[in-house]
Structure formats: C-alpha cells, structure tokens
Image (cartoon, helix red, strand yellow):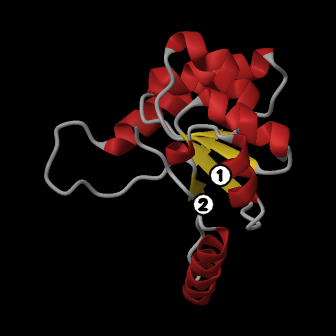
C-alpha cells in the first residue's frame, strides 16, 4: 500500500526559499493541498508555514482547513457540481470558474447564505483564433447580473 511521509524541516526550508523568491519578483502565490486529502496532521503542518491562501478541489478538504484555521482564505479550484454549490459557498472564500451558468448558481447561493458576491474576470488573448470572443461572454454576464 502506498503512503506518504512529510519532512517538516524540508517543507519549511522550501517554503521560505520560494516565498523569498516570489516576494522579490512581486508574485503572489497560494498552496494547493489537493494531494493531502484532508489529512488534519498534514494540513496543520502546511498551515503552520503561514500561508494566507490555500487551494483544494474537494469541499471536505476546505472544510477541514477552515476548522483548523478559519482565517485562512480557501479557494475551490474545480467547477462545482450543482448539488455541491451550497457547500462550496459555505466552505470556500473563492471559487475559480469559467462557465457563466456556474457563476450565476454560485452567486445566487451566496445571496441566499448572506455572503458577499464579487466577480473578477481575468481574460487573456486566446492562443489561436476562436469564434466566441471573451468580451462578449463578459458583457452578457454583467448585463445578466444587473437585471
């Protein structure tokens, strides 16, 4: 059976080295804890490094992170299934999504739960020509949200 061990001193050294380099270059970063599968012991070790933002693709893992340290900003890094939207809003501070319909579902649920809703659109030029321009999608979404 497979297992994983964590060398906390090496983890701390790597985190400090990367943090120094990223800060020198003005790069923000977050830790992805997907590999840790919600293991409380490992999550505590990672959170002890001082990360202010943690990303995961499972709501239960984000819930475990919030139990350990409610002040850590959690990021859900997978499009949620419709039935998990209430839990995503409950456990994640940020959810990364590209589908306007998913963003609308999350927005509606956030309003129901009394949470603030903020949408940020990050676009980049496509690598090759596509028929559906990003700006059209954004304009439609913004128009939809205003109504």
Quadrant of the image occupied by residue 48 = bottom right
- Rendered view: 105 above or below 27: above
- Does residue 94 appear anywhere in the picture? yes
**Circle nearer the N terminus (1, 2):** 2
Q: Which of 17 and 6 is in front in this view?
A: 6
Numbered disc total: 2
Residue 6 spot, x, y in % from top left: 58, 60
- Rendered view: 94 above or below 27: above
Q: Are marks 1 and 2 in contact (CB under 8 Å)?
A: yes
Residue 20 spot, x, y in % from top left: 63, 86
Q: Nearer the viewer, residue 105 or 55?
A: 55
Quadrant of the image occupied by residue 124 = bottom left
Report the residue marked by disc 2.
30
Residue drawn 62% across and 81% down? Answer: 13
Spatial CA distance of label 1 from label 2 is 6 Å
Report the residue marked by disc 1.
54
Residue 60 spot, x, y in % from top left: 65, 28
Q: Dot 1: within a 10 Å radius of its alpha carbon, few (fewer than 14), some, or many (20 or more) residues? A: many
As helix, strand or loop, the secondary structure at mark 1 comes to: strand
- Does residue 144 appear anywhere in the picture? no
As helix, strand or loop, the secondary structure at mark 2 comes to: loop
**Furthest residue in direction front, as rendered:** 1
**Furthest residue in direction left, as rendered:** 129
Whether residue 125 sits left or right of residue 22 in the image: it is: left
Residue 141 spot, x, y in % from top left: 50, 30
């Amino acid at each position: 059976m497979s297992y994983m061990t964590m060398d906390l001193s090496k983890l701390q050294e790597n985190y400090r080295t990367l943090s120094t380099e990223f800060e020198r270059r003005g790069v923000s970063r977050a830790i992805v804890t997907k590999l840790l599968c919600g293991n409380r012991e490992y999550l505590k070790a990672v959170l002890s490094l001082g990360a202010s933002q943690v990303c995961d693709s499972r709501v239960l893992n984000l819930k475990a992170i919030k139990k350990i340290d409610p002040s850590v900003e959690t990021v859900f890094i997978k499009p949620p299934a419709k039935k998990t939207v209430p839990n995503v809003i409950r456990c994640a501070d940020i959810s990364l999504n590209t589908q306007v319909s998913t963003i609308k579902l999350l927005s509606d649920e956030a309003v129901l739960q009394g949470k603030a809703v903020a949408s940020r659109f990050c676009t980049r030029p496509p690598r090759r020509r596509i028929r559906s321009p990003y700006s059209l999608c954004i304009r439609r979404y913004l128009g939809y949200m205003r109504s």
